[in-house]
Each structure stands twice: as structure tokens, then as C-alpha cells.
Image (spheres, rainbow, N blue to C red):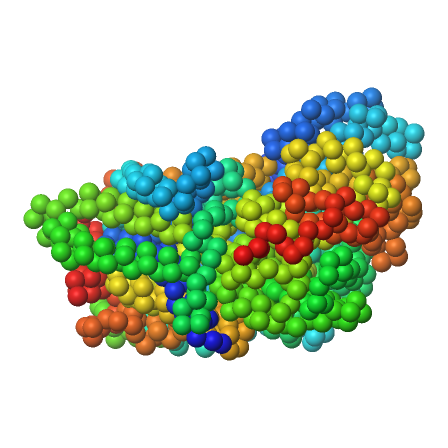
Amino acid sequence: MIGSPKRIGSGIAVWLVILGVLLYLPGHIGRGPQEILLNLLIWIGLAQAWNIIGGVGGQLSLGHSVFVGAGGYTLAMMMIKGGLSWPLAVIGGGLLSALLAWFLALPLLRLSGVYFTIGTSAVAIIALGWMVTWDWTGEARGLNIPLDALPSKTLKFQLIAFLAVLCCVVTYLILHSSFGLRLMAVRDDEGAASALGVSPRGVKAKAFIVSAFLTGLMGSTIAINQASIEPYSMFNLRWTVTALVMVIVGGMGTVWGPVIGAFIIYYLVDRSLQDQPVIQALLSGVLIILVISVAPDGVVGLARSAWAKVRGMRDSGDGDQQEPLTPGVVAHA
Amino acid sequence: MNRRKSVAAVSTVAALAMTLAACGSSSGGGSSSSAAATSASASASASASDSGGGATGDPIVLGTTLPLTGPLGVFGPPIQAGYEQAVAAINAAGGVDVGGTKRPLKLVIKDSKSDPTVVTSTTKSLITDDQAVALLGSVTPPLTIPFSVVADQEQIPAISSLTPTLAWKGASAAGWKYAYDVFVDEVEQTAVNFQASDLVENNKKVYLFTDTEEDGKAMGGLWEQQASKYGYTIVGRSNFPPGTTDFTQFVQKAKDSGADVVIAQIIPPDAVALWKAMKALKYQPKTAWPEKAGTVGFNQAVGPLAEGASVFGWWAPKNGNEGGQAVYDANKAQFGDGLGTACVIAAYAMVQIMADAITRAGSTEPDAINTALAATKDLPTVLAKITIGPDHRAVTPVNAVQWQGDAQPIVWPADQATAKMLAPVPGLAP
Amino acid sequence: MTAEALVNGALLGGLYALVALGLSLVFGIMRVVNLAHGIIVIAGAYFAIVITRQVPVDPLLTFLVVGPAIFLIAALTQRLLLQRLIGQSLEAPLVATFGLLLVGQGLFTYVFGTSPLSMSAPWAQNSISVFGMSILTVNMVAFALAVAVIIATQLVLTRTRFGAALRASASDPETASTLGVNINKMHALTFGIAASIAALAGIVYGTGLSVNPNDALPMLVLGFTVVVMGGVGNVPGTLVGGVLVGVVAAAVGGLIGPVYSPIAVNVLLLILLLVRPRGLFVRTTPRKPKTPAVTPNAATPAEVAA
């Protein structure tokens, strides 16, 4: 729903406080926790950016690895071949991804449902196939950014914290804007929305471009963090699949869902189990199954319904609420 | 969202940050060397690494991130075994002498899932969480390069093997500062295929099957460059994306070109598909080289078709190493009579080199170790005699091995050979 | 590029179709995007490898044991896990099957390692000359099996009471269930049958090529490509999709270079998606191309019955 300016203001204030805390942290916590938090923030940013098109917009894109890779490669190319400084290159990474998304939106958003998902995954495979043979970007060798051109550890952490919070704030603003309302209307019932005068494709295209822009920004910070990049890891489908799982586990179309999902998947599953390599995949699979069985609307959805029960009132039609995407098959659930 | 929710949200973040801080400082994650369930031969001596033998000082932490899962997962266990056995042996002998105090080594191992981005994060956590003073690498340029980048960034000495040294060197324009690579040189490595093929009579025509991965391109280029020097002609080359299943028309092309030598630099599943297609199309070259795929487990992957497939090797009993045979004999039952066990030896030698540098540094300060490491000269190890050059490479000698039964005896060079080269490739007989 | 290359590519397409058929059935009848499909194919191969290591029989014969075993495991998984999630949302079964994929991958990595493994059979290491072309026997076997399985599936769906019940439960579950069709049972059977077809594909794949746990995702992507090209839920279309992938890969590989094969296949997929979003061979004109994937009665039964 569209909040009053006052409420939106207080919502943003929360994020500014969080950002303030994060910016203050380097040097005040150990290097280990800082490193963990850095990786967590990258995942929060990626998951949140995906959430804008996938959760709020309901379009399950598998093509976001293209924007991770495009962001990272644009940054590296601007720094290596263009001799530009990293702040400009980060913005360049975001802009190029947005531009790519603008081109791709035209054909891809003619598809819906699973067809959109498969179409975007085809784009991701084409992009990877192209990047490993493109001489200009170093083919499969990839690119190595000179270490002395990169920001210091503190600055890098603050950059990533800023961008991750930016992704969250953008999602928050979208959810509380008339644009977000239109986007969710299209997600929940495209026919009805267009009957009310909303252009489904236009709305989805805008969300797709914003999502790609933010993903590109995060992609360029991944390249900064890696310093050496190559196509097989930068354009890997796994970026998108992991972000998707994080968002669904946390709660689609909510601001806190991706944050909680990233924490569960990256920290509780991946990170905590890294000394049990052989059974890690097994355990993470089991955990994902458990979470989705207990809370099909994600952790945020579970918390909401619990909260509604506690307050003894029905949680009727909150704008952030996840709607089932398969209207026809609910009957035999 | 109302105000009460906002307050709850902020406190959640605060609690989360505190949890992270607490977890990071206490547990840190990562398995110590004793956690190795995979390596049976190491477990006998693993207790020594825990107690530290007769060593008295604080343990010296060596960190490594290995591909225990993912596409390169075959290399994880032998490397792990090599590191563990070397650490156990050094600790059993009293530990490492650091300025007069004997200190035990402690090994911390983390899984990299064969993923370069995971290599970066786990290598950093080895330094920040586990306080590793030196790092041990894994395998292949895609994993070793990001590992070396972290070493240079964090200024912690790091040594790797099983990574062709020219590709590794080329990844740092300014030259590596804290990272080192001890392995073969690709120019020498790509010459092996021609030199060893000379052992059998052939028409000197070569067909190349290479993939789009970094090594496929680089090695393919080197074979093309070097062929004429050794009297060979490249009659054809096909490039494939990893994951190719249909090789028939390219095998037919190779067969039609009459090439007696087939060299393939493609990933294992693709090499299996290629070998099966060659067998089915009744194409039996004089020598055939499934490089990168035929190193470990090729006999399991293609069964009897593996017979006679050759690849380059990096260890031989008589290549100037010291004590290598004992390590080889102790491991060949588990990792096979061939390159799997040679991986154990390469890893073992990295610990020896690092321990020697720490002793010469007389300190566990990373900069002191780094300076000592760079000065490593004529050090006898189980792999070979090691001298680190100004470009931080130590080039080790190459040879050629051939799958014969379940073993990979050395067939070239003649003075190191342990078996005669079988030709034409028996596994591909029509 | 030669005719020989195209014929071999087309026949190998039969194997691709066999890999994709189960995916198509599960999506067509249950509306579940089964991300675990690739790992089921691989499971079939691993089961067969375990058996052939003990008893030296032809890999295809192991299907007599592997097929029912995989059927049981899959049907139970559907009954105990997926059933509760279907219908709640499109994402819940998607995520659950992703979890199953990870479990399977972890399990197989633990038991078999990450190196590729394969089986050998006389029919997988030979070629015969047809009109002067060398055709791999393994490709012929794969194609023949695909044709047989696809015809059988089509006959069951269109000519039996069971098939009618299946189609009814796909197109209108509510009505079907009031008419006495046990939807949950139908879904368990569908999932089981789809999985055992996948296992058969795995046995052929593991004999003609090889399997490893990390192949699960590429296998799944291949399946989707074939399914979409042939038309979702369109059983005979699967064969067309598979052949198309095989021929395009071989043609582009021969004309330009195999590096461009996956790019070409996916560009074609995108074009087909945009031009004919519901597959090449759909007779009925698409209704409003609104949300074909989630409109239960749009895609499947009409074409399945056709």
C-alpha cells in the first residue's frame, strides 16, 4: 500500500540507522566477523535486487547471472582498459546492466510464468557461451584487476554495506509506492490490472530494469572483492538460483524476506557447515525442504500469520502479502 | 510497516550482528586435520599431528581450501592426504624449528566446492578466523589464481602446486608478491605429447580436441606453436564448450585426416564421450592423450577403453626427489598406482617447502616467511629438488604416463620409464 | 557438415527426448516444475552402475530392477513431501524439488565421488554403415527406446481409463475429484512413472556417455530446452524437441563450430518461445498469451489427447 510520507520517512530512517551501524563496524569488529558480514551483505543485495522482479513482480527470472557478470566485467574493463577509478566503474557496472535489461525486457517480458523463467535461463546460457569466446574480455582467462587500484578493506566493506542497504531501501520504497501497487496488481492478476488501465509490460519492464541495475551494482562489487574474475564463475547460473532460494525461503515480495533468507542460506547453512563438506549439500537440501514445508510463504510469511493469530485478528489483504500464483490448482491442496 | 515493527527490525539487526561477532571469534569453523574421514592412510599418523609429538611451542596454523566437492572434487582427497601426512610426519619428528623453539604444525582445511568465488571467501576466512600464517593451495589456475590474489591482498605467504605455472604467472601483470607456484611449465608440458609419441612409429599428424576453458585455449595454442619444432603437423583442431556430448562428426574428421596422434584438453565427462565416440567409430590412433580428464579415475570413467590412454605426469621415482618413493608406496593402495598418488606427493612437498621457509625465517611473521620462501634454493623434497625463481615459480620436471590396467606407469623419458608404451592405443581397438 | 553428422545428431536427440519426457509429464499433469529431474536421471544411472558392478549384465536389463525402485522412491516422495506443497504456490514445490536436487547431489557425491562413471555394453561401442554413413548404434538404441516409450505413454494417456483420469486430473482437478478420481493417487503415479522413464534415460546416458553428480543442473536445463521446443505437456512433441536440439547442435557445430552450438540452441529456444510460446506443434491457436503456464486447461489435455 502507499504509505503516508511520514510513515515512509520512519521506514527509511530505520534503514539509515542500520546503514550507520554498518558503516561504523569496520575496525570495531574482528576481521573474521567483518568478512562474514561482507559476504552476507553481498548476498542480501543480490537477493533483494532479485526480489524486486521475482518477489514483488512475481517474474521468476533465472537470467540475473547476466547482470552479475555484466556488472563485474564492466567494472573490470573500465578499470583495466579505461583506467577509470572504481567508484565510476561501479556506477558503470550498474548502468550497463540496466541498459542490457532494457534491451532484454522487450522480448523477455512478452513471456510469462514458467516461459519467462526458461527464456531468462536461455539468455543466461547464451551470455556465458558468448563470454568464454569473447577475445576482448579475455575469453575464459577472464580479467585481473590490479590490486592497488582497488579500495581499501574498510572502504570496500562500506561500499558493499551502502549498496546492500540501497537495495533494501529501493524495495521498501517500491512496496510503498503507487508503482509497487501496480506491480503487485499485475503479479496477482494481470488481466484485472490491465482492465484497470495498468500496462503490465511497462510496469514489469521498469521493475526488471531497476532489479538489473541493482544486481549490476552488486556484480561490480563482487568483482572488486574477487579482483580476478572469469566467465564461468561470474556468469554462473548459481548466483540466480541461490538468490531465488534465499528470497523464497525468507519470504517473497517482502523487504525483510531476502535479508532473513540470505542469513539462513549463507550463514546458517553454507557458512556453518563448511567443515562438513561432503554432507553439506545434503544437509542444506534437507533444511531447504524443511523450511519450505513448514513455511511455504517463507519465514516472513510464517511470522506474519503467527503475529496475526497472536493479535487475534485476520490478516486481510496486506499489500505485501504473498498471493498464490496458481489460481486454478488450489482446490486439492 | 508501523513503528513497533521498525524498532523490532533494528533490534533484530543488532542481535544478528552480535551473533556474528560471537560466532566469528569463538568457533571460526573449518576442520582441523584430525577431521579427515576420507584418508585412511593418514588416520594412522593423524594422532601425531594433534599431540604435536615432542614439540613445545604454540602450533603454527597452515590453512588450505580444497575442492572436496564440485567438478574438481577428485583432486581434494589426495591433496588433503598429502598435506595431512606431511604435517603428521613433521610433527612426529618434533615439529618445526622456529628460532630455537620446536613448534607443531596445525592444518585447517575448508571446502572450496571447486568454485573460484568460494575460494576467495574461504581463503579470507582461513586468515581472519583461523589465524593461518601461511596458506597451501589446491589445483588448476581457476582455483589457484583467486587463492593467490587473496594471499597478495592479505600479505600472507601462499604456495600452490598442481597448477601449470605459466597460466598462473600470466594472471598477475605486476608479478606475484606473496604467492608461489611449484609445478610444470606448460611449454615443457605440451612438448611431452610429441616427444613421447616419438616412442612409437607414427605419421606425425596430430588432431587437437580442446575446450573453451582457460587451459584448453592456452594449451591448444602451445601445441600448435610447438608441433613443427618436434616434426609434427597439426592436421585439425576442434574447440568445444564444456558439456559437449556429440563428438561424432569431429571424430570422423580426425579419422579422415589420418591423424595418428590425438590430443584432447577437455573436461572429464566430455573426454568420456569423446573416447566412446572414437571407439564406436573404430578410430584407433597410435597415441591418444586425454589431458586433464585422464589424470585421475579415467579407468573408472570409461572402463576398458582407458587402456593405453596417456597423459603428462609430474613425478617419477628417479626425477631427483628425496623420499618420494616412500610416500608413493604408502598411498598407492588408496589413490592408485599413478597420478592420484602423484597429487599426494605434490601436496606433501608444499608443506616441506613451507616448513623449511619458516625455519629459515626463524619466525612466523608472514613477511619473514615470505622472504625466506622466495630464497628457497635446491631444497630436496618428495616431489623434486625445488628452487624458487624470481617470478615465484619453481618449475618441476615433466614425464608421460600411460593407463595400463588400473595403473599409470611412466613411459617417457626413457631414463625414468617404468613401462613400455603400448601402441596403437589398445583400449580403442575396433 | 555432413548428412552423417545430422543423422547422428537427430538420433542422439532421441536420448534428449527420453531425458525430457518425465519433466514434461510432471509439468503437464501436476503443474510442478521438478528441479530434481536431472538428479533422478543420474540416480537411474548410478543404480544401474551398482548392479552391473555386481552382476555383469547388459545395462538395459538393470531397468527391470532400477525402474520399479525409482518408481517407488519417487511415488513416496510425492506422497510424503510434494503433495502438501502442490497448489499452495508455484514456488513451494519448486524450492522443495531444489532441496531434493541438493540432497541427491550430496548423497551421490558422498557415495560415488565427483568423477564421471559409465557402463559399457556392446551396443554402446559400435557403429554400422547405413547408406555409406557411419551411425552409432548407441544413438539408434536411444532413438528406438524414445520412440517406443513415447508411443506407449501416448497410448496410455489417450486409450485407457487411467489415462483419461490422468488427463482429467490435469485439466480440471476439482471436477475430476468429484467424479471419483483420486487426484493425490494420480499425482503419485505420474511422479513415479515420470521418474522411472528418467531412470531409463539415465541408464542409456550412463552407458552411451557418463554421469557425475554435477551433471544434474545441465541435465535439467537440457530437459527444459527440449520440453519447451516440443511444447509443454505435448508427449510426441518431446521427440521433436529432442531431435531439433540434436540436429541444430550438429549443424551449427559442423558449419560454424561446436563452441556456438549451445548458443544456437538457446537462441532458437528464445525465438520459439517468442513466436510459438507453447511449442512448435500446437494445433489450436493460443488463447490470450496471458499466463499459459499457470492456466491449467490451456496447454495439456487438448494436445495430449490430440
Residue A166 visible in rendering: no
Q: Residue A144: give x, y in percent of width and height.
A: 70, 64
Q: Tell me how many marks there are.
A: 0
Q: Nearer the viewer, residue A257 or A212?
A: A212
User: Is residue B9 positioned above or below C224 on the image?
Assistant: above
Q: Nearer the viewer, residue B180 or A266?
A: B180
Q: Name the residue at 66% across, 33% down.
A: B333
Residue B89 visible in rendering: yes
Q: Residue A184: give x, y in percent of width and height.
A: 32, 63
Q: Nearer the viewer, residue C267 or A172?
A: C267
- The C terminus of chain C appears in which quarter of the rendering? bottom left
Q: Residue B84: give x, y in percent of width and height.
A: 71, 34
Q: Write down the quadrant of residue C154 in the picture.
A: bottom left
Q: Is residue C13 left or right of residue B341?
A: left
Q: Nearer the viewer, residue C274 or B341?
A: B341
Q: Name the residue at 87% across, 51% down.
A: B388
Q: Name the residue at 15% across, 49% down.
A: C162
Q: Is residue B250 left or right of residue B50?
A: left
